[in-house]
Amino acid sequence: MQSTSEQFAAIREEFGPDSLARVEEMMAPGGLPRHPLQAGAKWILPGISQRPWHDPRSDPAIASLVDALEGAHSSIKAEHESAWQTKREMFSAYEHYLTHQDNWQSLYLYRDGDLIQDAAGTAPTAFDIIKDVAVGDELICPLLESHFSTLLPGSRIAPHCDLWNFSINLHFAVDIPADCDITVAGEMRAWEEGRCLLFDYSFEHHAENRSARPRTCLLIDLWHPKATVPERQALTVLVTEVRKLLTDM
């Protein structure tokens, strides 16, 4: 198997000697200057937007995914409700790198670089959109995942930063009771059922469900549109190798 440096060299040979300059700068000892509310993130890729909230339709490729999800809201919601009522064993407590929360339940459609085939019959509409658009158009970040995120009544996700800024998080609001909101970099927004929010989760963020019933969004981890193809390849190599080393320790 090729080493990380050998794989980086192959990427440079294909795309040019400067194609990984920003990745190398990101990896430099001491890190890079960043917004104070990104202090908890491990890696900040330079040269891409440093803003917490994004317009879900500002990038044409992501806009296609947003349109597909929003156009299928009623089917996605009905299929999730049926699964929640009749196939609860498909859901599991969400395992974030910082925490384990039983009051934050997930049904995965994509994980560990591949689609979860068991979900195809449980949530077929959402599964097909993830497969055909998010995966098919190479929008999804293979280092991360897509899942239905159900926050139980009275629950809270504590403030935290995710690990990097080269992917961004799309929230499709599937079933949203009143008194639910998300705050990113100090700006609170409420989900609008059937619509999408998009944000950079390297900025500190938290979410709350103060209602008496569950809140569900479909979450999709997407490549930041300003991360280039060679950078995406190199970042996948880098993070995969780091995870392997941590597992072997």
Image (spheres, helix red, strand yellow):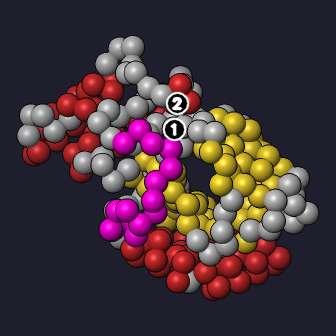
**Separation (CA) of disc 1 from disc 2:** 6 Å
The stretch drawn in magenta includes residue 57: yes
Figure quadrant of the N terminus: top left
Could you say whether the residue bearing mark 2 is in a helix, strand or loop? Answer: helix
Could you say whether the residue bearing mark 1 is in a helix, strand or loop? Answer: loop
Residue farthest along the front direction in this orientation: 187
- Compare residues 14 and 202 and report the one nearer the observer: 202
Please report the residue visible at 50 percent of the width from the left and 44 percent of the height from the top: 52
- Compare residues 131 and 29 and report the one nearer the observer: 29
| Residue 123 image offset from top left, x and y in percent | 62, 77
Left or right of 62: which side holds 52? Answer: right
Question: Given contact means CB atoms under 8 Å apart, are the residues at marks 1 and 2 in contact?
Answer: yes
Please report the residue visible at 39 percent of the width from the left and 52 percent of the height from the top: 223
- Assess disc 1: are there few (<14), some (14-19) or many (≥20) residues with their C-alpha within 10 Å of its C-alpha: many
Q: What is the number of the mark on residue 202?
A: 1
The residue under label 1 is which amino acid type? Ser
For residue 179, say whether it is visible: yes
Report the predominant secondary structure element of the magenta stretch: loop
Task: Please state the extent of the stretch shown in magenta in the rendering.
Answer: 49-63
The residue under label 2 is which amino acid type? Gln
> Does label 1 or label 2 sit earlier along the sequence?
2
- Assess disc 2: are there few (<14), some (14-19) or many (≥20) residues with their C-alpha within 10 Å of its C-alpha: many
Quarter-wise, where is residue 210 in the image?
Answer: bottom right
Q: What is the number of the mark on residue 38?
A: 2
| Residue 173 image offset from top left, x and y in percent | 64, 68
Answer above or below: position of 73 versus 210.
below
Please report the residue visible at 11 percent of the width from the left and 45 percent of the height from the top: 15
Residue farthest along the top direction in this orientation: 30
